[in-house]
Image: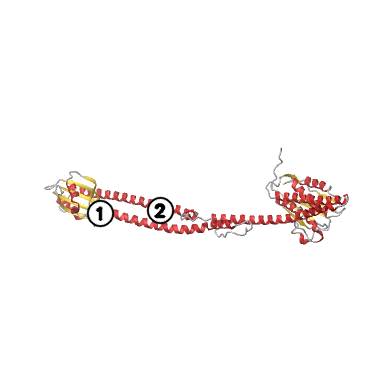
Amino acid sequence: MKSTSPWRWTSSIRVRIVAVVVVLLVLSSVGSVLLLRLVLFERLNEEIGTSLDREAEEFRLLAGGVDPRTGEPFGEDLSAIFDVYFSREIADEGETLLAFLDGELYESRRAPQVPDPGEFRSTVQYWLGLEEMAKGTIDTPAGQTSYVAVPFEGDPFDGIFVVANFPANEQSEIDQAVQTQLVVQLGTTILASLLSLALAGRVLRPLKSLAETARIISDTDLSRRIDTTGKDEASQIADAFNDMLARLEQSFTTQRQFLDDTSHELRTPLTVIRGQMELIDLDETPEERAETVALVTDEVDRMTQIVSDLFVLARAERPDFLALDRVEVRELVLGVYRKMTALAARDWQVHAPEPTVILADRHRVTQALLQLADNAVKFTEAGATIRLDAEVSPQAVRLWVMDSGPGIPAQDADQIFTRFKRGSGRNTAKTGGAGLGLSIVAAIAEAHGGSASLVTRPGWGACFEILLPRPAVVPPANPG
């Protein structure tokens, strides 16, 4: 059941990822802008202090020099000093230059937007009361002002030179630039967030499809797949999910077919047993009852064999199906041959290869060869030839079980190793009785990384081949 909470959108991974990114971007933008404003204000104060010191130093040097108009030292003629200074000096941005004689404003220069001295009379009175050079900041009606004041003694009047800077206008420009930068960054963040939301939706779309597909998948419909186009991590997850669905679908299909075939195979002996048990009371003689019991016992034995074979095939899917060890091929072939000869009276033949060591499960390979031998015995007459042959190459070991019987029709060659599949025509039984014998042979060969197949050998009827690949390196024998 889907949530109806108004905050259900916060459960989206896409929204949460974008929200975290947006918060981080906003915090970084605001922090960087505030830091930029602080740095710009610090630099402005440093530049103002440097400019004030330079102006004051230039005035002191001029006062200690000579009058360029007369070539004589200025002495204590402050008016002459002020005239020469102001004739060549202009005020920098936010700056005002003031010269006072006998408490009155003698001359001034000020930059645009700097207030007139009459607008900060209290501050002027403070400067006029100074008896020594002073430097600092002071609050004025136009804002906080930095200044340097240099008093001079003159004849006939004393004077004072003041250079002051009103940074309010420059600070306002900085604030406007910072605000513009902040707006631009926030706008960029919003745009980037919208793009990220769309991109995140596209990137996470396979995961959403995965969730939707997982919700509608049932044990009877595993055919749905997730559409993927990219190569990112989400698409890789979706591809892996599709692969898993394909394997599950194949496994479930095989399982259902296997169970259907198994139930079909077991239904026949169960029907026979039930029918015979229902009729056993009608048997009038001990011989008839013994015949019925023998028939029922034979069907029970057949069912037991089917169940046993099913158990082997089920274990073939497990990793511990094989117990691999060093196996000497010549000894293996000769050992299997001795066991084969006890199956029935046939013309048994064997060809053992040169001694060669491979990595295999001796018990399982023996089981597969004996299964082929038993299959050959069932469908050949007494005196028929059955041959066990082997060939060793650097890449593989090939084992054959051949008989001189009528063989298997070519149209059945591709399906005889399939579970519960029988051939056609006279030699249907050649495919393995209940349809599991050759499946076991194939499972054992494939568990070794090899294969089982029906091949053609001149002069022989049915010829089954087991191919076992040889590893590049065979581990040494375990001394224990």
Q: Residue 26 carries which label?
A: 2
Q: Which residue lies furthest to the top in this view?
A: 480
Q: How far across and down, in percent of the image, does residue 226 sit? A: 58, 59
Image position, residue 50 (x, y; %): 27, 49
Left/right of residue 295 with respect to residue 444 in the rendered view: right
Q: How crowded is mark 1: few (under 14 residues within 10 Å), some or many (20 or more)?
A: many
Nearer the N terminus, badge 2 or badge 1? 2
Determine whether, in the image, residue 220 is placed left or right of residue 293: left
In percent of width and height, residue 164 lies at 23, 50
Q: Is mark 1 on a helix, strand or loop?
A: loop
* Residue identifier under label 1: 94
Amino acid type, mark 2: Val
Is residue 109 shown left or right of residue 380?
A: left
| Relative height, residue 224 to residue 304 (above, below) | below
From the top left corner, tell me how far across and down residue 381 is, in percent: 86, 54
**Of 393 and 406, the residue lying toward us:** 406
- State left or right for residue 426 relative to residue 471: right
Q: Nearer the viewer, mark 2 or mark 1?
A: 2
Question: What numbered label is drawn on residue 441?
Answer: none
Location of residue 328 by image quarter:
top right
